[in-house]
Image (cartoon, helix red, strand yellow):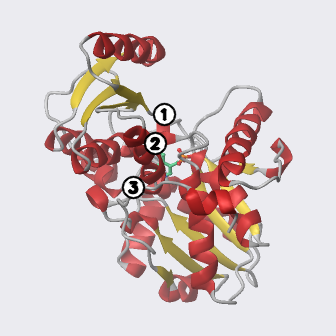
Amino acid sequence: MSATAAKLSRCKLAHLPTPLEELRTLTMKIGGPKIFIKRDDQTGLALGGNKVRKLEFLLADALAQGCDTLITLGAAQSNHCRQTAAAAAACSLKCELILNGKKPELPQGNLFLDELFGATIHWIERSQRAAKSAELMESLTKEGRKPYLIPVGGSNGIGALGYVTAMTEFMEQLNGRRINRIVFGTSSGGTQAGMVVGARVAGFKGQLTAIGIDKDERDLNLYEQELAEIANDSATRFGIADRFTPKDFEVIRGYAGGGYGIVGDLERNAIRTLAQTEGILLDPVYAGRAFGAMLDMIQKGQIAADETVLFWHTGGAPALFAYVKDLAI
Ligand SMILES: Cc1ncc(COP(=O)(O)O)c(C=O)c1O
């Protein structure tokens, strides 16, 4: 570990290490490849998920700056917002969430949990949310509070440190076993950026295959550029000299179906398959889509039967309860 890495401040929120398990029944059912799963749905805080790892570093930064309020933003069923609200409660901070859309009659899934954790919720058109976060930062400051703004998904160089360190945890668990490829969902980028840096740090030589969750209609390379920026910031903070470019990131597109949060057969089948073969819950928006993509790539031979693959489960199951209409048969 670099001297800088050893000094990184971190607020203990997650139950680590998360389990690494083999999906034996599923592997047998589909006839290979051998599939493992890394259970970041079990990071503990607030029903778990990938954001808890990022929040360990973001909260440490907020506390070091003497902040008393976290502000963050996302979709109405944001897992990131739910985990941020819980992290704020655990650290005796206030939490203000800026959520897309209009307040529903009945709060369900993640939104219900946001309220249980005591967050204040602001509803806003998605296009207005950057302006709203700036306005909220200003008004809270005027009231004498000290707000800390966490970007969408906790995806900046600080948050991504959660996945830089996760790769070392994972390599220690592997204990010499070989994994050819890790598959996971990518959306705001902090998980992928951190894993790519962490793979370099921990010496993981396999492929990191990220499944694009969003229907990205922008210049296709723009996302990879953002990933490189987050990764480079994280690498600097971690204290390594390596630099990353868009070419260091593999993003598989074409599985976003009807768009963000729109559940189709891919997600439905993936959720039922893993639930019924292994008793493990995926979510309808991220992990369900990424797992469905992995099964499709296996079926098409894009992931070979003689590979050993790891699905990195990033959580999100609380959203299942807001998607019953789309998932029940
Ligand atoms: C369950 C789940 N998986 C994956 C992701 C994607 O992670 P990232 O935003 O770091 O790309 C998210 C992001 O919100 C998520 O909630």
Q: Measured from the top left, where is residue 218 in percent x and y?
A: 71, 25
Toward the viewer: 300 or 41? 41
Q: Quadrant of the C terminus?
A: bottom left
Foreground label between 1 and 3? 3
Q: Position of residue 4 (x, y in %)?
A: 65, 56
Which sits earlier in the primary sequence, circle 1 or circle 2? 2
Of the numbered discs 1 and 3, the one sitting upstream in the chain is 3
Per the model, the C-alpha gap separating discs 1 and 3 is 20 Å
Could you tell whether 142 is left or right of 179 in the image?
left
Q: For the residue carrying disc 3, how many other residues have a C-alpha within 10 Å: few (<14), some (14-19), or many (20+)?
A: some
Give the number of the disc on residue 61.
2
**Residue type indicated by callout 2:** Asp
Some atom of ligand 1 lies within 8 Å of the CB belonging to the residue at label 1: yes
Q: CA distance from mark 1 to mark 2?
A: 17 Å
Nearer-N-terminus badge (3/2): 3
Identify the residue shown where x is 38% and y is 10%: 135
Residue bearing mark 3:
11
Question: Residue tagged by mark 1?
Answer: 152
| Type of amino acid under label 3 | Cys
